[in-house]
Image: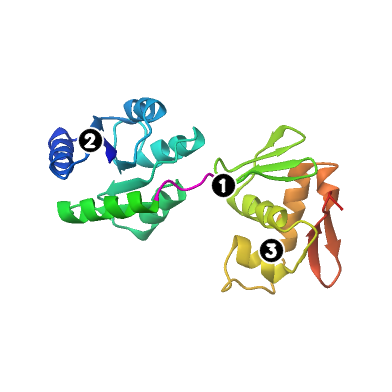
Amino acid sequence: MRVLIVEDEARMADVIRRTLVRDGAAADVAANGADALELAARIDYDAIVLDVMLPGASGFDVCRRLRERGAWSPVLMLTALDGVHDRVAGLDSGADDYLAKPFALAELQARLRALVRRGCPERPAILRCGDLTLDPARREVHCASKAVSLSAREFALIEAFMRRPGDVLSRLDLIEAAWDVAYENRSNIVDVYVRRLRAKLGEPAAGAIETLRGAGYRLRDERQ
């Protein structure tokens, strides 16, 4: 097993490295995000231990850039931040697991072994429908090869449409995709966001999102 340790505290990095080496692993150390990205581009690591609090770019940013650059080694994120928001931010940036400081080295080893057994996650497939292209890994949407800047809600809506082209999606379906089931579904929030989404996509893509009175919305399946 070859592991990349991204940790700016030299003592902590050395302790983790020596622990992993004693366990039979090969371990490299990067003290900042730039060095980590350079090493990950050259070496196919079995796992990456990534601290959140780094000089310059945060661990969240580094993880996101790793995924954007096609590095899909499992990432175990180390954080002194124990709030739910921070854990969610780590997982949303592409991390596979997290461990809050202080931690037991035995637990770190066990979590790494579990991630390596699981293997590298497959890169999410790029979705295409007509002039629209959606890359879930990079969270990018293009319309006729032109990048479209979307909010998180708008991105979740278009992703829901593109995963089920031709299907009629009710307002509740779309609320569950972009909000949650506890959201007040009698609100017209879905209609508001669909209008915003159409405006940002522009024609002809906007016209592909059809309104079905009393039923919901549908993204016209260009294959039919």
Q: Label 2 belongs to which residue?
A: 26
Q: Which residue is mark 3?
A: 189
Q: Of the numbered discs in the image, which one, if any, rests on residue 124?
A: 1
Q: CA distance from mark 1 to mark 3?
A: 28 Å
Image quarter in which the N terminus is found: top left
Q: Quadrant of residue 194?
A: bottom right
Which of the two labelled residues, at mark 1 and mark 3, occupies the earlier sequence position?
1
Q: Position of residue 43 (x, y in %)?
A: 36, 29
Whichever of callouts 1 and 2 sits on the residue coming sooner in the sequence is 2
Look at the numbered disc 1 and give the secondary structure of its residue: loop
User: At 79% across and 62% down in the image, what residue appears?
Assistant: 217
Q: Residue shown at 80%/41% (left/top)?
A: 202
**Region of the chain picked out in magenta, as a range:** 119-123
Query: Residues at badges 1 and 2 in contact (C-beta under 8 Å)?
Result: no
Side of 205 where 100 appears, left or right: left
Q: Nearer the viewer, mark 1 or mark 3?
A: 1
- The span from disc 1 to disc 2 (Cα, nearest Å) is 29 Å
Q: Is residue 136 visible?
A: yes
> Most prominent secondary structure in the magenta stretch?
loop
State the residue in front, 24 or 173.
24
